Image (tube, rainbow, N blue to C red):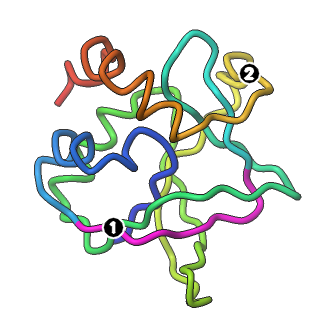
Amino acid sequence: MENLFAYGTLMCSSIMTAVSGCRLSAVPATLEGYSRRCVKGERYPAILPHREGRVAGELYRHVPDAAWTRLDRFEGEMYARRGVEVALRDGTVLLAATYVVVPQFLYRLDHADWDFAEFLQNGKADFQSHYQGYLYL
């Protein structure tokens, strides 16, 4: 897989660059059939399959192999990389990988939807200074 659909903290180009080890450009994309939820007590979200769900995010194209290793470590055991189809604004559908919460961690999800604008305003600095996933890069 060479494309990544980011729906949470990795939508921030500065976080994506730090995590992936490279600068990648992104375009807006939408993932149907999933919903994005807050993770209890955290600043980041998770997605899970949901028939009527729709998640807005960013599509990073041509992600290099070395970046996938870093991304997998950053996401940790709570997420599994899965192949999905995402739609661009012009209606083009592309294959991408994304990180989906694994079933044994569903109990950690809140019912509230995660808000990217709120994260940028109130949570990004806290996330960058406290998220343990950075230790594994």
Query: What x and y, as percent, mark residue 108?
Result: 67, 17
Alpha-carbon neighbours of circle 2 within 10 Å: few (<14), some, or many (≥20)? Answer: some
Residue shown at the point (21%, 63%) measured from the top left: 24
Q: Going by the image, does 92 lie left or right of 63?
A: right
Q: Which mark is residue 93?
A: none
For the magenta stretch, what is the residue range? 25-34
Decide: is 99 above or below 129: below
Q: Quadrant of the C terminus?
A: top left
Q: Inspect the image, locate mark 2, and give the three-letter code of the amino acid beneath it.
A: Asp
Most common SS among magenta residues? strand
Q: Amino acid at mark 1?
A: Ala
Tell me the tag on residue 26. 1
- Is residue 102 positioned above or below 85 on the image? above
Secondary structure, mark 1, is strand
Q: CA distance from mark 2 to mark 1?
A: 28 Å
Does residue 90 sit above or below 113 in this rendering?
below
29 magenta-colored? yes
Q: Which residue is mark 2?
A: 110
Q: Give the left or right position of residue 79, taking residue 120 as reference.
A: right
Query: Which secondary structure, mark 2?
Result: loop
Q: Residue furthest right?
A: 52
Specify the quadrant that holds the N terminus: bottom left
Residue at image x 63%, y 34%?
114
